[in-house]
Image (tube, coloured by chain):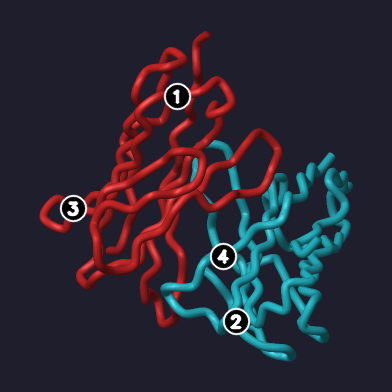
Chain colours: A cyan, B red
């Protein structure tokens, strides 16, 4: 079955710790994205990558970092610099390199809670 | 500034009743339009999309949406709602903004279905 997997489903972090969220896709998509979702708000773009070994900041990149060493993987690190990291994080991918008409396909999400 | 507005935060309908979820956007050029659905604690699933051509588009699960350029709207409709349609619905617009192509999401409309 082709799709996007995110792990873990739930993640708890103590203040001051970095934590890494996993995102893997076997759709052979070029572009991958990370979004943050907070209650009552739409999704906000954190980072995106149009191709391996390249990524760009989205609208709310501060306190986050990413890497794209393999086409199928796009891990997100939430650093201690992120002041309010408790949220639902969604990973997505699209077949081509980030055009405005690209359909994005989403993973099941990771809920991060800072204790 | 480019934006997407979903005026209704929460809608409740009876099973079997018709449904219309509103979406308005602000964008100077022709947008690419999407509707996604999210079940609690899950990722987003694409319902339908509009790029060009016939302004009435059909999607999965019996949903349809109509693009009205004069009203900058892309409302989602379903003639008869099922209990399994209870979820959160997001309108999104693909556009070039802030130096890159992106999806801008509305804040979502949460649908409750009464038996």
CB-based contact (under 8 Å), mark 4 and mark 3: no
**Residue wearing tag 4:** A104
User: What x and y, as percent, mark residue A74?
Assistant: 77, 73
Please give the residue where the numbered disc 3 appears in the rendered image. Answer: B68
Name the N-terminal-most of marks 2 and 4.
2
Residue A94 figure quarter: bottom right
- Identify the residue shown where x is 77% and y is 64%: A2
Residue B70 position within the rendered picture, expressed as x and y whole percent measured from the top left: 11, 55
For label 4, count other residues whose C-alpha is less than 10 Å away and answer few (under 14), some (14-19) or many (20+): many
Q: Label 1, on which residue?
A: B81
Chain of the residue under the numbered disc 3 shown in the image: B
Q: Nearer the viewer, mark 2 or mark 4?
A: 4
Q: Quadrant of the C terminus of chain A?
A: top right
Looking at the rendered image, the disc whose residue lies closer to the viewer, 1 or 2, is: 1
Label 3, label 1: how far apart the Cα atoms are: 23 Å
Q: Position of residue B51 (x, y in %)?
A: 34, 67
- As drawn, the label of residue A56 is 2
Secondary structure under tag 4 reads loop
User: On the same chain: label 3 and label 2?
Assistant: no
- Nearer the observer: mark 3 or 1; the answer is 1
Q: Chain of mark 1?
A: B
Q: Do the residues at discs 1 and 4 belong to one chain?
A: no
| Mark 3 or mark 1: whose residue is earlier in sequence | 3
- Marked residue chain, label 2: A
The span from disc 4 to disc 3 (Cα, nearest Å) is 23 Å
Is residue A72 placed above or below B58 in the rendered structure? below
Q: Classify mark 1: residues with Cα within 10 Å, few (<14), some (14-19) or many (20+).
A: many
Give neighbour class at mark 3: few <14, some 14-19, many 20+ (Cα, 10 Å). Answer: few
Name the mark on residue A102: none
**Closest to the observer, A81 or A6:** A6
């Amino acid at each position: 079955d082709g799709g996007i997997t995110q792990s873990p489903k739930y993640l708890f972090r103590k203040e001051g710790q970095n934590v890494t969220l996993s995102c893997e896709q076997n759709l052979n998509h070029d572009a991958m994205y990370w979004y943050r979702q907070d209650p009552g708000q739409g999704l906000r773009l954190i980072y995106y990558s149009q191709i391996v070994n390249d990524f760009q900041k989205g609208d709310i990149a501060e306190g986050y970092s990413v890497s794209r060493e393999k086409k199928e993987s796009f891990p997100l690190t939430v650093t201690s610099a992120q002041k309010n990291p408790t949220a639902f994080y969604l990973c997505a991918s699209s077949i081509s390199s980030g055009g405005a008409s690209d359909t994005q396909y989403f993973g099941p999400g990771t809920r991060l809670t800072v204790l | 500034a480019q934006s997407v507005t979903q005026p209704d935060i929460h809608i409740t309908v009876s099973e079997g009743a018709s449904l219309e979820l509103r979406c308005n956007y602000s964008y100077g050029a022709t947008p690419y339009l999407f509707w996604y659905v999210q079940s609690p604690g899950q990722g987003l699933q694409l319902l339908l999309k509009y790029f060009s051509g016939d302004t009435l588009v059909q999607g999965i699960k019996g949903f349809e949406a109509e693009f009205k350029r004069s009203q900058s709207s892309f409302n989602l409709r379903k003639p008869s709602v099922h209990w399994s349609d209870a979820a959160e619905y997001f309108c999104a617009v693909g556009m070039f903004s802030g130096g890159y192509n992106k999806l801008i999401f509305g804040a979502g409309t949460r649908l409750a279905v009464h038996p």
